[in-house]
Amino acid sequence: MTQLRFAPRHARPRRAPLYRATMCALWLGGSLCAGGALAQDAGPAQPPPAQASEARTLETVSVLGSRRAQRSSDTTSISPVDVLPMAKNAEEGAQFDLAQSLQYAAPSFNSTRQSGADGADLVDSAALRGLGSDQTLVLVNGKRHHTTALLNLFGARNRGNTGTDLNTIPLMAIDSVEILRDGAAAQYGSDAIAGVMNISLKKRKGCEAVAGYGQYSKGDGENWLATAYCGFGLGSDGSIGITGEWQDRGRSDRSEPAGSPRIIGDSKVKNQTLFLNGDKPLGENLDLYFTLGAQRRDASSAAFAREGIGSEDIPSRNSAAMYPDGFVPFIDGDIDDRFGILGLRWSLGEWNADLSYTYGYSKLRYTINNTLNASLANLDLINGGKGVSPRSFDAGGFSFEQNTVNFDVNRFYDHIFRGLNVAFGLERRDERYKIFAGEPGSYLDYDGDSDGGNAGSQGFPGFRPGDAGGHSRDSWAAYADVEADFTERFTAGVAVRYEDYSDFGNTTTGKLAAGFRATDTLMFRASASTGFRAPSLQQKYFSSTITDFVNGQPVDVVIAPNGGALANQAGLPALTKEKSRNYTLGLTWSPTADTSLTLDAYRIDIDDRIVLSGRFGDDDPVIGDALRALQVGQAQFFVNSVDTRTEGVDFTFNNERELGNDFKLGTFFALNLNRTKVRAIHAPPALVGREDVLLSERERLFIEQGAPRSKAVLGFDLSRGAWEGNFKAIYFGPQTLGTFTGTAGGVPNARYKAKASADLSVTYAFSDNTKLTVGGSNLFNVKPTRQDPNETDNGHIFDSVQFGLNGTAYFVRLWHKF
């Protein structure tokens, strides 16, 4: 395993705001008590010996990618795993949330903050190795975390994907994040195609708090943070860690020209989060463990602006009586996220068992503010009124719920070969997805005039009763996993997993991995596996009519559910699983005690990949009449239609040394190179010959280059006494995205040149328990390559790609340990 140690920096100190944030954090920390202990994970472990008269804690440790009861060392792992301690990020980091912290620390990880992408502006999706966010499995303490209810429909990243909202977990609650850069569906089930992330939570004793403040050099995007953690004993032998966090991030605006009615930048976010993590021995061989998390998020995203008097937007999208100078609608989201684990670990002789229940819930409801229903305003004008409508509408929303029961058993035989671990288990999972209709004014057409006002709330039409409904499914799984040290130098493991889903059937996956230690410092490793991803309920059943802007002109687009009347008329089959084949070949080398490097090459083939199709217009020979009857201009569907191949290389280097005169220098370099290509398009019989619509060039480029094809991080951490300085350079490779008009229409693709960002921070420790950090990120104010705003997804001079669009930022953090 490789330890990645450098955290990002940014934002500007301001004295009075910082003082208030500090007092808030210290008050929160002081309101909690003291105590606590370790993190638990993916598989049960052998307990330490204990006296017969005392209860013992059956501790587990994180061994992502392996279910062996005895932990492998960092240099002998047969799977490529990065271990990222989060203490430095929580205490000194420029980024105030988990997704962005990982974005600037792990090259194989991508999470780009969207702007002008509706609900995707409110949730930062995350992904590995250039694939989709729903092809990365996220665990918390070794248990499957739920995905968000949101389905990303706009933006360069994760188009058509669900994913896990990492920002529901506060940095202060996390001990470490492990990233398994390998396919692992045979070990952990659906979604583990690109890799697996395991977030290990703290429960060690002690209290600490952080107050943070940041803003962009433009003077906007103020970011406030107050967070505190306390770990304390639970009885005489248990432990519990409690984390509370409050975050308030202001809106930023990079729209052009200056004074433009558009707002492009960070969405406005207010988070209130509480996490608990702990365990309690119930007897000598029996432990109870638990995790509880809850977050309430109020977020606001700016939609496309509507113009005022003298424009074509009156009366179709505006009312002269309400917004004579134009307006910007706000898509406001009320997000409720909950997560919980309750489990028992016990041992019976040499066998270890773990029975757990995991609950996850994500809900997002939309309120569209500073808006109108233009058809209602026009009807009011026709009837002799002023021409007004309500300015706010409940547009409905959706929720996703996941219930998982796991039973895992393992045993380590130290007398077979040089050690043999056997593990097996069962899993039962239930999932529910609901869509809630909005109020009638958010979707109805009141004037019935095609030349009058448009229906629904401007910026985001509400979900209609026909969209609303509940859907569910369940699945069963059984797995077996064996790992053996055949000699002192050769280790191999094999895993097989069977799953049966109520909606599409069953699948069997397998994995073989091996490592050979050629010398005490050099190890070669390889793996081959098959995998799968079940279609998400969100992809199967999402249904909505949205307003998009194509070449600056509004177009109503229906996202039709799979299995619905429109999809059936188009001849689209029911969604089924994606199938993958993963291959990895690499090495680890530790030439000295303070130097290590890893190099891993990989290939990931995915068949029947689920994609959001291109847009079928109302001139389509099959469904054109149906679209005109629905009064929409275009339709999109989810379909298993693409085979892709992803190839790449991961490289990491780590060195720590003393330079003399009490100076210590840490150096870290990591690089990810990847390339995804569409190998084949499989059109259903009804769409043969229209593959260019099913997967247009623009949609193909979202799959192939939605993330940079290369990314590198070079960091230096220099310390002496109470002072510490951190410098980091982050390189983002080029990307090419499609345009609305397309190359066939004579408009070249949007090419984003490679860019690099530089971060710098300085930390001063007043004592072992108090330190202050100030710094900045993207110090040279680098921004993506300019594009034609009529051809970008968000109507801005560039989309949210690579590292975002806000420019230089500054920050200050104060950390105190009680």
Image (spheres, rainbow, N blue to C red):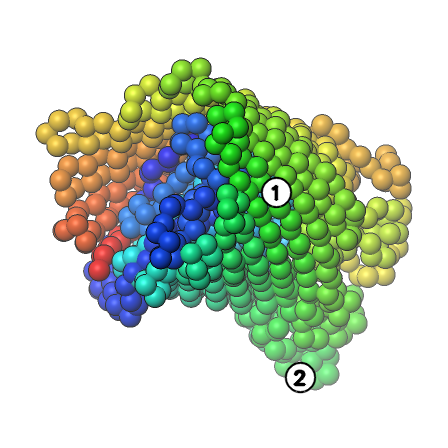
Q: Is residue 590 above or below residue 730?
A: above
Where is residue 414? Give x, y as percent.
Answer: 48, 32
**Residue labelled with disc 2:** 385
Q: Residue furthest top?
A: 518
Question: Can you give x and y, in whole percent of width and height, for residue 564 in the image?
Answer: 82, 57
> Is disc 2 surrounded by few (<14), some (14 to 19) or many (20+) residues within 10 Å?
few
Q: Position of residue 265 (x, y in %)?
A: 46, 53
Which residue is at a point 77% across and 33% down the rendered structure image? 681
Q: If you read the primary sequence from the N terminus, does the residue marked by circle 1 or circle 2 appear first?
A: 2
Q: Residue at x 37, y 19 (%)?
A: 521
Position of the N terminus by quadrant: top left
Instruction: Give amino acid for label 1.
Output: Phe
Task: Please give the name of the residue rendered at 82% of the width and 37% of the height, measured from the top-left corner.
Answer: 683
* Label pair 1/2, CB-CB below 8 angstroms: no
Q: What residue occupies the far left of the structure in this picture?
A: 661
- Quick check: can you spot residue 780? no
Vertical arrangement, residue 99 with respect to residue 223, above or below: above
The residue lying toward the viewer, choosing from 38 and 210, is 38
Q: Position of residue 249 (x, y in %)?
A: 40, 60
Binning the other alpha carbons within 10 Å of mark 1 as few (below 14), some (14 to 19) or many (20 upward) gives many
Q: Judging from the image, what secondary structure is the residue with disc 1 in?
A: strand
Residue drawn at the location 36% of the way across and 50% of the way down:
50
Which residue occupies the foreground of this view, 813 or 380? 813
Residue 424: numbered disc? 1
Which three-letter amino acid code belongs to the residue tagged 2? Gly
Q: Which part of the image, by quadrant, shows the C terminus?
A: bottom left
Kindly indicate the quadrant of the structure image that contains residue 220.
bottom left
Q: Secondary structure at mark 2?
A: loop
The image quadrant of residue 13 is bottom left
Q: Quadrant of residue 14?
A: bottom left
